[in-house]
Image (cartoon, rainbow, N blue to C red):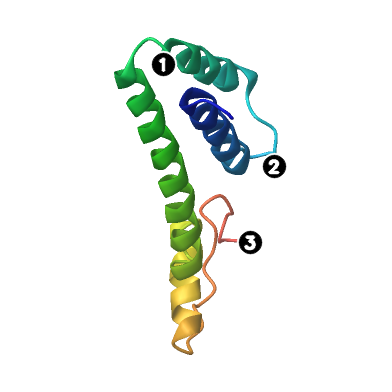
Amino acid sequence: MLSQHARVYRAALRELKKASLPPHKINPALSSNFRALAEKSSKSNAILEDLRSAVAFLGSQREYQGLLERYNPLIDLTVEERIEATARRVGLNMPKTADNGEDSDK
């Protein structure tokens, strides 16, 4: 049977794998820091609670990002792209404008 400390450490690793940008590729510095905290948690219950809080935070952040992307698909667009997407949503098209870098006299 696994101890509480090992369970919390493994839960932290699972959350780190799910949150990592290249899928399932954990930053070695993060995993070593969590391992060190898990080893210290055997001496202090406060550190164990902090680890549990960190695992809950990582899971909540991942879920929040998923919900944000699902219900607000315009979140990662630039201002101009967001305006165009909003206009298209109500059936309008934005007029073509000259870019600031181009010379309009040509």
Tally of marks: 3
**Label at residue 23:** 2
| Vertical position of residue 52 compared to residue 38: above or below | below
Amino acid on which disc 3 is placed: Lys
> Can you tell which of label 1 and label 2 is closer to the viewer?
1
Amino acid on which disc 1 is placed: Ser
Q: Which residue is drawn at the image coordinates 44% and 87% (left, top)? A: 90
Disc nearer the start of the sequence (3/2):
2
Left or right of 16? Residue 63 is left
| Vertical position of residue 32 compared to residue 96: above or below | above
Helix, strand, or loop for circle 2? loop
**Label at residue 41:** 1
Q: Residues within 10 Å of mark 1 (few under 14, many from 20)?
A: many
Q: Which residue is drawn at the image coordinates 47% and 87% (left, top)? A: 92
In the rendering, at what x and y percent does residue 28 appear?
64, 19
| Vertical position of residue 52 compared to residue 75: above or below | above
Amino acid on which disc 2 is placed: Pro
Q: Nearer the viewer, residue 103 or 21?
A: 21
Splitting the image into 4 quarters, where does residue 98 fall?
bottom right
Helix, strand, or loop for circle 3? loop
Q: Residues within 10 Å of mark 3 (few under 14, many from 20)?
A: few
In the picture, the quarter occupied by the C terminus is bottom right
